[in-house]
Image: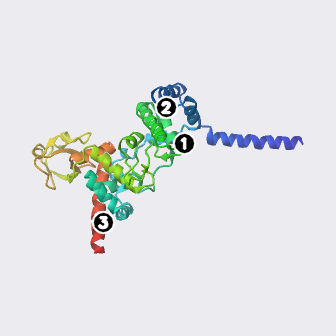
């Protein structure tokens, strides 16, 4: 009996230890969390007890902190570009376009956003739903809100929006998954973007960017249009550089402020015609590869601040457009 009792105790301790390792991750900063709960209660009428219950089930995720410390956009273009500009993603983009022709056309008619750009954004963000994120959003946002001081205010704001929209949409805040930064659905909207720009494009009473391609398409187009997308406007053109003054003109934020005439004085000229009145920004990719970004390129950086991201979207859009046009020609 003593040996049996000891064995039972050993098994119980082993199971308890495994449970603790799997579920009892370190808690969040107590003072910060309590302040957040109090703010949500006072400003938005949330029940304190319900919020404490939610956060008692949320987990600090060290993988989130590791991932945000090494974003893909930190890679050089020679490594970043091929992640998205490859035959498999281009083919998947053509398939997505073919399956959603009427929705993309409707979005273009309403918002004026190039269908190829919408398709490319969804391709870059989630590979058309294949890589929509495996992190619980409540875990990711809570970890970053309370354990990542560098951007804690931003992520606390996103956590606030997340709790608001799950209440508004009657969703379970513990059930939704997304990226390590808390971005969600086919277009990877942050919670604030969901509340501001997501649309019920098919008018079925639900704003579903997770499983409804129509809502995802309409939401991306609405986002870009609201950020200043110009219908039929150019995005970016490659630049030919023969002078030495180009480095001083490289834009840090892709804001187009330079006249084409200014650029040409440095020995730099667009390889594709650009309106003389257009404003451009000089974008440097790898050494000696330069592009001129126009207004629509800058708008893409409102979706993701990285010029590399905007360039990946632009080049993927062009590749998908050409492949899709060929398939349409072959079908006829």
The quadrant where residue 122 appears: bottom left
Q: Badge 2, how many Cα within 10 Å: few under 14, some, many 20+?
A: many
Q: Badge 1, how many Cα within 10 Å: few under 14, some, many 20+?
A: some
Q: Element type at marker 2?
A: helix
Disc 2: which residue = 146
**x and y, in percent, of residue 142 in the image:** 50, 36
Disc number for residue 324? 3
Between circles 3 and 1, the one closer to the viewer is 1
**Can see residue 315?**
no
Q: Which circle's residue, 2 or 1, is located before the other in the chain?
A: 2
- Residue at 24% of width from left, 42% of height from top? 254
Location of the N terminus by quadrant is top right
Q: Which circle's residue, 2 or 3, is located before the other in the chain?
A: 2
**x and y, in percent, of residue 138 in the image:** 51, 40
Task: State how many labels appear.
Answer: 3
Q: Which circle's residue, 3 or 1, is located before the other in the chain?
A: 1
**x and y, in percent, of residue 327 in the image:** 31, 70
Alpha-carbon distance for marks 3 and 1?
A: 39 Å
In depth, the one of 58 and 273 nearer the eye is: 58
**Can see residue 254?**
yes
Instruction: Report the side of 54 relative to 153 (left or right).
Output: right
Alpha-carbon distance for marks 2 and 1?
A: 17 Å
Disc number for residue 174? 1
Between circles 2 and 1, the one closer to the viewer is 1
**Up/down of 36 relative to 64, above or below:** above
In depth, the one of 196 and 309 nearer the eye is: 196
Instruction: Report the side of 260 relative to 150 (left or right).
Output: left
């Amino acid at each position: 009996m003593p040996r049996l009792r000891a064995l039972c105790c050993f098994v119980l301790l082993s199971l308890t230890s495994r449970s603790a390792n799997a579920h009892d991750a370190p808690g969040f900063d107590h003072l910060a969390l309590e302040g957040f709960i109090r703010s949500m209660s006072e400003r938005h009428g949330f029940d304190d007890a319900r919020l404490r219950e939610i956060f008692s089930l949320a987990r600090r995720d060290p993988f989130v902190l590791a991932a945000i410390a090494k974003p893909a956009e930190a890679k050089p273009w020679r490594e970043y570009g091929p992640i998205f500009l490859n035959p498999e993603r281009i083919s998947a983009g053509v398939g997505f376009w073919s399956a959603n022709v009427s929705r993309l056309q409707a979005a273009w008619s309403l918002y004026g956003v190039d269908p190829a750009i919408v398709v490319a954004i969804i391709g870059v963000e989630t590979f058309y739903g294949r890589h929509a994120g495996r992190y619980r959003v409540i875990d990711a946002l809570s970890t970053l809100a309370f354990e990542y001081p560098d951007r804690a205010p931003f992520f606390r704001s996103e956590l606030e929006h997340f709790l608001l929209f799950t209440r508004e949409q009657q969703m379970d805040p513990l059930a939704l998954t997304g990226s390590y930064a808390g971005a969600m659905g086919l277009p990877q909207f942050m919670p604030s973007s969901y509340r501001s720009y997501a649309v019920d494009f098919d008018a079925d009473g639900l704003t579903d960017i997770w499983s409804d391609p129509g809502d995802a398409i309409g939401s991306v187009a609405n986002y870009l249009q609201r950020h200043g997308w110009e219908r039929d406007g150019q995005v970016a053109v490659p630049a030919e550089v023969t002078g030495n003054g180009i480095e001083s003109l490289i834009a840090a934020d892709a804001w187009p402020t330079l006249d084409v005439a200014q650029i040409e004085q440095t020995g730099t000229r667009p390889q594709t015609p650009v309106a003389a009145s257009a404003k451009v920004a000089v974008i440097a990719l790898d050494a000696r590869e330069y592009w001129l970004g126009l207004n629509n390129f800058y708008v893409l950086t409102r979706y993701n601040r990285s010029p590399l991201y905007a360039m990946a979207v632009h080049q993927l859009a062009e590749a998908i457009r050409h492949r899709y046009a060929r398939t349409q020609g072959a079908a006829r």
